[in-house]
C-alpha cells in the first residue's frame, strides 16, 4: 500500500463491504448480491457495494418525502449554513477524498484534488446563493394590484452521475438543490461507487449533527436498473443525469413520459480552433491537457483540433514531441502525467475507435496501443494517440471516451467554425488566437454553437461560477453557476388585489 490507500479509506470511514443504500448516516442492508469496485490503477479490489432493490428503493424514497416536508421549512440561509459545514468537512478531507477518487477512477492525484476543490467551490457558491434566491416583481395592469414571483422548493431531486467525475457532479447538483430546499437521492456510477459512499458519509454526518431527519441526502447504489426506477418515479420531479447521450435519451424519454423535468449533461465532441494568430505555446499546452488529461475521459476533453493550414505542420510537430514526453503510469504517483482509463470495456472502445479511424482513412501521427508489463498489470493503461482525420468521418462525429485526438486542417475562419459546429454534440469549444476579430467572430451568434466557448483556454477545466452544460445531443442542461439554481425550484407567480373592487384582466366586462 505504497500510497496509503487503506489509511485514507479508514479516515473516510469506508467499511470494506456491503454498502448499498443510505438515507443519511444509516445504511440499509438489501441482502442483494454485491458489486465490486476495482482500481484501474493496479487492478486491486477496493471494496464492494450492494445493489439497491425495489424494496430498499421504496424505503429511501418514502424517507426522502418525509424529510422534504421538514427541510423545505428551514429558512434558505440556514440551509446554506449546513452546506457551508459540508464544504468545510470536504476541506478537511480533501487529501483523502482526492486520493480515493484518483485510485478508484484513475485520474491523477492532482486532478482528484481538483475534483474535491470543485465540490468545495460549489458549496461556497451555494452558501452565497442561499441568500439570493431572487424572484422578480412586475407591475400589474390592474389598479390596486401587486404582482410578483417567488421560487419554492421542488421536492426530491434524483441525481445520476458518471464515473469520470464520480463526486463533483453530484455536489454541483446537491449543494444547489439543498439550499433551494430540495432533498437529493443520488445514484453514483457503479464504476466508482466508493468515492460516492465517502461523500454520502461526510454529508450525512453534517445533517445529523444539525438534528435534521434522515432523507435529505440519500444514496442508492446499483446499475442502470436503479436509474430506471428513478426516471419512472413521479415522486421525483427532477432527474439530473450525467453520462452518455444514449443513457440521456433513455432518461429523457422516461421522465418525459410522466412530464417530469430532466436536466441532462451528456456527451461532448469538443474542438479547439488554432488560428495562425495563436500564441503557439499556449495552444500546445491547452490542447495537450485537454486531450490527455483524465486520459481523455472528461465530457469536456479536447477531441478535435481544427488548425489553420499555415500553422498545421508546426502544431503537428510540437504536439507529437510533447506526446513523446508524456509519462504514463499510476495516477497516484505524481511524476506521471496520464493514468489508466476506467476499465477493460473502455480499453476496448479505445481500440475499436483506433481501428475505425484507420479504416476510414485517418493517418496516424502518434501511435496508440495498450501498455503491458510492470506497473500496467490492470490492463487499463493506453497510449494517447493522434490521428489526422476529416471531420465528417463517422468516428470523428462520435464521442470516444479515451485519449484520441483528431487533427483537422482549415483555410478560413468561417470554415473552421463550420467544422467545429458540424458534430451532433455541443458542449465545449475554444479558439486560440491573439486576433480580436477572430475571437469575437467565434463568440458571436454565428460562431460556436456550444454551451461553453473559450478564448485562449482549452475546452476543459470550467469553473464553478459559470453555468455548465451544452446544446444539441449534450442535452441542454445547465448546472452549477450563474442562475442554474432555477432548475431546482418551482416558480410561482402571485397576483394580490388590495383594492376593494375586482377588475378583470384584459379589461373584460362581466357584470350581472
Ligand atoms: C465532466 O467531464 O463531466 O470543465 C465535467 C471541466 C470540469 C468538469 C467536467 N470542471 O472539465
Image: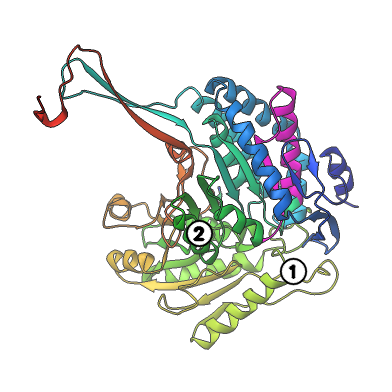
**Point 58% across, 46% down: residue:** 158
- Image coordinates for residue 470, horizontal then vertical, percent: 43, 54
Left or right: 252, with 122 as reference point: left
* Residue extent of the magenta highlight: 194-223
First in sequence: mark 2 vs mark 1: 2
- Rendering quarter of residue 27: top right
Q: Is residue 343 magenta?
A: no
Real-space Cα separation, disc 2 to disc 1, in angstroms: 34 Å
Between 78 and 406, the one nearer to me in the picture: 78
Please say whether residue 222 is one of the residues in the magenta stretch: yes
Q: Nearer the viewer, residue 384 or 488?
A: 488
Quarter location, residue 331: bottom right
Q: Indicate left or right for 316 with 102 as reference.
A: left
Badge 2 is on which residue?
254
Q: In this view of the protein, can residue 368 be seen by the observer? A: no
Drawn side of residue 233 relative to residue 496, left or right: right
Give the numbered dot on residue 380. 1
Residue sitting at x 40%, y 26%:
134
Amino acid at each position: 500500500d505504497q500510497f496509503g490507500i487503506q489509511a485514507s479509506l479508514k479516515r473516510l470511514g469506508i467499511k470494506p463491504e456491503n454498502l448499498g443504500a443510505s438515507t443519511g448516516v444509516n445504511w440499509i442492508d438489501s441482502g442483494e448480491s454485491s458489486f465490486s469496485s476495482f482500481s484501474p490503477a493496479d487492478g486491486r479490489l477496493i471494496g464492494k457495494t450492494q445493489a439497491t432493490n425495489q424494496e430498499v428503493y421504496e424505503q429511501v424514497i418514502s424517507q426522502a418525502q418525509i424529510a422534504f416536508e421538514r427541510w423545505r421549512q428551514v429558512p434558505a440561509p440556514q440551509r446554506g449554513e449546513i452546506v457551508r459545514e459540508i464544504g468545510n468537512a470536504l476541506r478537511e478531507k480533501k487529501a483523502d477524498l482526492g486520493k480515493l477518487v484518483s485510485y478508484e477512477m484513475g485520474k491523477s492525484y492532482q486532478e482528484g484534488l481538483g475534483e474535491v476543490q470543485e465540490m468545495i467551490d460549489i458549496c461556497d457558491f451555494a452558501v452565497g446563493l442561499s441568500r439570493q434566491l431572487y424572484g422578480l416583481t412586475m407591475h400589474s395592469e390592474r389598479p390596486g394590484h401587486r404582482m410578483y414571483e417567488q421560487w419554492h422548493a421542488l421536492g426530491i431531486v434524483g441525481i445520476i452521475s458518471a464515473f469520470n467525475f464520480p463526486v463533483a457532479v453530484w455536489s454541483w447538483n446537491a449543494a444547489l438543490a439543498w439550499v433551494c430546499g430540495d432533498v437529493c437521492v443520488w445514484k453514483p456510477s457503479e464504476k466508482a461507487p466508493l468515492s460516492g459512499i465517502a461523500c454520502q458519509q461526510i454529508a450525512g454526518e453534517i445533517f445529523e449533527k444539525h438534528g435534521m431527519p434522515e432523507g435529505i441526502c440519500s444514496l442508492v447504489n446499483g446499475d442502470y436498473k436503479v436509474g430506471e426506477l428513478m426516471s419512472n418515479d413521479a415522486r421525483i420531479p427532477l432527474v439530473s443525469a450525467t453520462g452518455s447521450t444514449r443513457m440521456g435519451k433513455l432518461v429523457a424519454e422516461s421522465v418525459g413520459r410522466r412530464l417530469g423535468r430532466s436536466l441532462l449533461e451528456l456527451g461532448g465532441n469538443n474542438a479547439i480552433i488554432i488560428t495562425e494568430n495563436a500564441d503557439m505555446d499556449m495552444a500546445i499546452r491547452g490542447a495537450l491537457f485537454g486531450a490527455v488529461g483524465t486520459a481523455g475521459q472528461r465530457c469536456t476533453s479536447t477531441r478535435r483540433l481544427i488548425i489553420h493550414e499555415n500553422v498545421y505542420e508546426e502544431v503537428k510537430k510540437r504536439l507529437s514531441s510533447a506526446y513523446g514526453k508524456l509519462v504514463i503510469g499510476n495516477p497516484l504517483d505524481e511524476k506521471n502525467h496520464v493514468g489508466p482509463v476506467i476499465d477493460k470495456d473502455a480499453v476496448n472502445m479505445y481500440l475499436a475507435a483506433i481501428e475505425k479511424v484507420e479504416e476510414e482513412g485517418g493517418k496516424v501521427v502518434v501511435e496508440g496501443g495498450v501498455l503491458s508489463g510492470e506497473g500496467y498489470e490492470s490492463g487499463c493503461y493506453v497510449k494517447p494517440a493522434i490521428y489526422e482525420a476529416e471531420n465528417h468521418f463517422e468516428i470523428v462525429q462520435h464521442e470516444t471516451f479515451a485519449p484520441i485526438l483528431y487533427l483537422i486542417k482549415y483555410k478560413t475562419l468561417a470554415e473552421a467554425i463550420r467544422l467545429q459546429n458540424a458534430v451532433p454534440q455541443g458542449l465545449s469549444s475554444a479558439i486560440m488566437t491573439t486576433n480580436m476579430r477572430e475571437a469575437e467572430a467565434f463568440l458571436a451568434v454565428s460562431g460556436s454553437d456550444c454551451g461553453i466557448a473559450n478564448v485562449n483556454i482549452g475546452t476543459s477545466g470550467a469553473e464553478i461560477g459559470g453555468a455548465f452544460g451544452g446544446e444539441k445531443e449534450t442535452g441542454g442542461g445547465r448546472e452549477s453557476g450563474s442562475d442554474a439554481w432555477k432548475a431546482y425550484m418551482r416558480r410561482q407567480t402571485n397576483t394580490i388585489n388590495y383594492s376593494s373592487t375586482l377588475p378583470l384582466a384584459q379589461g373584460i366586462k362581466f357584470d350581472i
